[in-house]
């Protein structure tokens, strides 16, 4: 962290993951405008948002495995190029179905990009430096995600919603240049050469069927189609576990879950990120549809979270490395839940200063306390040679949480096409959604207290260190070196 080489690595990973985080949140603020221009009800807007998340979550594990086999930097750069191309397709899409199709492609590219950023960090730093780097990465990535609605709101007001996708092109170009010049290559030389295509396909079917079934049930109620999709999704999920168990080259080695801390932290991730995704989805719509704020003002409402995460995530990550992640992962969700309860005051005629800002500040403090320790706990509980798999699992869990939360939300809180267009009905659904999200965060806190261990970071033993990296440590001895190690 104190050397130029380490800062270049951090810059590349922050830009890459920040671009993906920015795109995941910037679209939410544009949904009302997209709906007016391209047509479609609430379910169409759900697919614009979830199309990206679906393929991102479905192929994140595959992306992590590809990085371990073919080189994390190489896959990271490939994902950046693909992300830029898909973003261009989104920007020129003339109809909602074509926009959804482009978003699906964008998610595939994001699945190559996102796990690589965290795996590169884990392979390039050790000990307290790794925790601090991950904390900084979490903070800056959180900044990109939280700044997304503000940036999107400005572009929508000043230009067009299409510019929220064109913004990715210069960012992707910067990621490619910095990565090729300054990021050392790393890979897991013990990873199987074959890629688990069957596992990726079955996993995609499971998530796709569940998402379609939940969205269809929210729009039309439980029907033979929605029930069939939900059953198919559950069966495909069970089949995925069996495929990975039997495979000689699984993209998700089930042995990684032998660590109770790794498993517990991912359970907490699923719960906490479901609540976070629900909150961001509902809040930016509430501010526009009910409170009457413009897209830019609605987006700017989340800037306090940006400032808090920028100022505190690296420090919180370093503190979690000293005392363990459990205190932060237990207290952080409770603080965020208090912020959600304050959001119940956000309604017709709400004041930004007295109603919106206090709630957002408290919610942001909770996120700052939670996100960096959670991410660091996942990676430190897995061996270094499984860095790609570990980061892929955690990212997939987080994205899946958001995907399913947004899909099930209309069914859970009574939000449909009629209530989406009626400010009074939407306000009622917002209150129910906020209370539900607060309850989920309380559950996340309790799970952290039960499942997340104390200070037991996993430092790789010498025999586990299968790669050489200039930032990470000294060059391997000649008899240990692998092809390309001198370039890693």
Image (cartoon, rainbow, N blue to C red):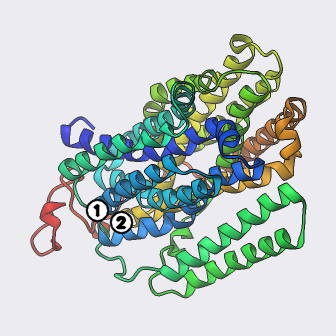
User: Of callouts 2 and 1, which one flags the residue occurring earlier in the amino acid sequence?
Assistant: 2
Can you say whether 278 is above or below 43 in the image? Answer: above
Q: Is residue 109 left or right of residue 268?
A: left
Residue 127 x %, y %: 35, 48
Quadrant including the N terminus: top left
Name the spot of residue 188 as percent of width and height, x first. 32, 70
Q: Is residue 421 visible?
A: yes
Helix, strand or loop for disc 1 = helix
Q: Residue furthest left?
A: 478
In front here: 28 or 395? 28
Task: Categorize mark 2 by other alpha carbons within 10 Å: few (<14), some (14-19), many (20+).
Answer: many
> From where the camera sits, is residue 267 visible?
no
Q: Residue at x 42, y 79 (%)?
A: 195
Residue with the mark numbered 2: 67
Label 2, secondary structure: give it.
Answer: helix
Tell me: 196 left or right of 463.
right
Give whichever of 374, 85 is nearer the camera: 85
Q: Which mark is residue 74?
A: 1
């Amino acid at each position: 962290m104190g050397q130029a080489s380490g800062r270049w690595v951090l810059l590349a990973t922050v830009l890459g993951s920040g671009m993906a985080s920015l795109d995941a949140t910037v679209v939410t603020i544009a949904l009302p405008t997209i709906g007016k221009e391209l047509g479609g009800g609430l379910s169409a807007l759900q697919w614009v948002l979830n199309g990206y998340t679906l393929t991102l979550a479905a192929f994140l594990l595959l992306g992590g495995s590809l990085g371990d086999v073919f080189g994390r930097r190489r896959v990271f750069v490939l994902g950046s190029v693909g992300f830029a191309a898909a973003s261009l397709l989104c920007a020129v899409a003339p109809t909602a179905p074509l926009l959804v199709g482009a978003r699906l492609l964008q998610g595939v590219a994001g699945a190559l990009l996102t796990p690589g950023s965290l795996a590169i960090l884990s392979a390039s730093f050790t000990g307290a430096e790794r925790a601090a780097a991950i904390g900084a990465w979490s903070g800056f990535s959180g900044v990109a995600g939280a700044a997304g609605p503000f940036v999107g709101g400005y572009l929508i007001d000043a230009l067009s919603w299409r510019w929220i996708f064109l913004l990715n092109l210069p960012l992707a170009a910067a990621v490619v240049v910095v990565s090729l010049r300054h990021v050392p290559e790393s890979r897991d030389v013990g990873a199987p050469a074959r890629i688990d295509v069957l596992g990726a396909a079955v996993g995609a079917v499971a998530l796709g069927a569940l998402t379609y079934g939940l969205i269809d049930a929210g729009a039309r109620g439980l029907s033979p189609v929605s029930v069939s999709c939900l059953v198919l999704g559950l069966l495909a999920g069970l089949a995925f576990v069996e495929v990975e168990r039997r495979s000689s080259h699984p993209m998700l080695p089930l042995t990684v879950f032998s660590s109770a801390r790794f498993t517990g932290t991912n359970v907490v991730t699923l719960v906490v990120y479901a609540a976070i995704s629900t909150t961001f989805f509902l809040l930016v719509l509430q501010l526009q549809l009910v409170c009457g704020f413009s897209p830019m003002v609605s987006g700017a409402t989340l800037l306090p979270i940006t400032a808090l995460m920028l100022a505190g995530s690296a420090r919180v990550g370093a503190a979690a490395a000293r005392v363990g992640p459990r205190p932060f992962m237990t207290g952080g969700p409770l603080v965020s839940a208090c912020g959600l309860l304050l959001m119940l005051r956000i309604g017709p005629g709400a004041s930004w200063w007295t109603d919106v800002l206090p709630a957002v500040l408290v919610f942001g403090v909770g996120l700052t306390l939670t996100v960096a320790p959670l991410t660091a706990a996942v990676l430190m509980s897995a061996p270094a040679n499984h860095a790609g798999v570990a980061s892929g699992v955690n990212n997939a869990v987080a994205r899946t949480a958001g995907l399913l939360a947004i899909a099930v939300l209309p069914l859970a809180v009574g939000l449909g096409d009629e209530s989406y267009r009626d400010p009074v009905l939407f306000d009622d659904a917002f209150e129910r959604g906020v209370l539900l999200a607060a309850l989920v965060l309380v559950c996340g806190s309790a799970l952290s207290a039960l499942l997340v261990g104390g200070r037991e970071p996993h430092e790789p033993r010498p025999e586990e260190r299968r790669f050489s990296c200039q930032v990470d440590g000294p060059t391997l001895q000649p008899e240990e070196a692998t092809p390309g190690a001198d370039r890693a």
